[in-house]
Amino acid sequence: MKDPNSRENLKDIKIDVNLAYLIGVLHSDGCIYAFNDRKRNKKITRLNLTIGEKSIPMAEKFRNILQTYCGINVKLRKSHYKNSYQIQTSINRSRNIFESWRKEELIEPIKSDIELFGGYLAGLIDGDGHIKIKHNKDRILPQCVVRISSDHPLTNLKESMKELFNCKIHHYKDKRSACVDTCFYISNKNTKLFYKFVYPHITLPHKINKLDKFLRLKNEPVRI
């Protein structure tokens, strides 16, 4: 029986919504790096995902996708750091495919398929997203802004967000932080699309609860 984690089996792997989610998490909280194993005098390519306690559901979903699609069986372990958990494994045999996934340019068909892009965006939001409900005095209904933090503007999202979700992206840099927030609004133009293609794939309860709250507020009858 062939190893499901062999390069031969992974090179033609078909991207579906689960793998799109995994790539989104990889682009947010994941890391691929080379490790020099001195004992075996060998360079090893490693995949690492380090998360806080609140993000355990995301990490478990990431781990299950790794096992199901890539044949990589790895446990989520408590890290040496306080309240931190980690997935770490060698990906030497599947290095090429993972390195192609870690490139910032969105690959086809993710960038042009709304279902796949929705899964990818859910992975980004679970990883580095922040959801805020805004109550503005000059607006009757609340607004919901989604911010994805990174060390640089995520310009790779711009075209797909405009074409698939009919919304614009803007970037915000707080002088007190090293991060840049890539921001977009859930509006009347894209609410149905967001809740159909992105919301079902988000795993973190505190982010789901915030999106549920926004939808309830948005659908409440206006009080005069």
Image (cartoon, helix red, strand yellow):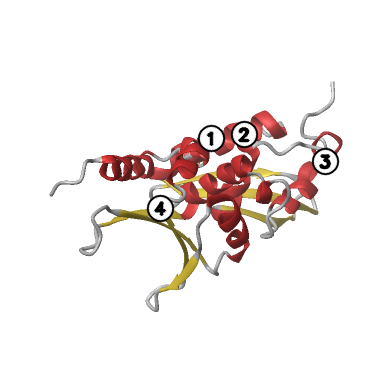
Viewer-nearest residue: 215 or 141 = 141
Disc 3 versus disc 4: distance between alpha carbons?
39 Å
Nearest to N terminus: mark 3 or mark 4: 3
Mark 2 crowd level (few <14, some 14–19, many ≥20, 10 Å Cα): some
Residue designated by label 3 = 11
| Residue type pointed to by label 4 | Ser
| Residue type pointed to by label 2 | Ile
Disc 1 versus disc 3: distance between alpha carbons?
22 Å
| Residue type pointed to by label 1 | Lys
Q: How many marks?
A: 4
**147 relative to 101 in the view: left or right:** left
Disc 4 versus disc 2: distance between alpha carbons?
31 Å
Residue contact between numbered discs 1 and 2, judged by CB atoms under 8 Å: yes
**94 relative to 191 in the view: left or right:** right
Residue appearing at x 55%, y 68% in the figure:
153
> Residue 200: where, in percent of width, then height?
48, 35
> Residue 146: where, in percent of width, then height?
42, 55
Viewer-nearest residue: 151 or 75 = 151
Which mark is on residue 65?
A: 2
Q: Residue furthest bottom?
A: 175
Residue appearing at x 62%, y 37% in the figure:
17
Nearest to N terminus: mark 1 or mark 3: 3
> Residue 182: where, in percent of width, then height?
49, 64
4 or 2: mark nearer the eye:
4
Which mark is on residue 187?
A: 4
Residue appearing at x 53%, y 54% in the figure:
166
Q: Is residue 92 visible?
A: yes
Q: Secondary structure at mark 3?
A: loop
Residue designated by label 1 = 61
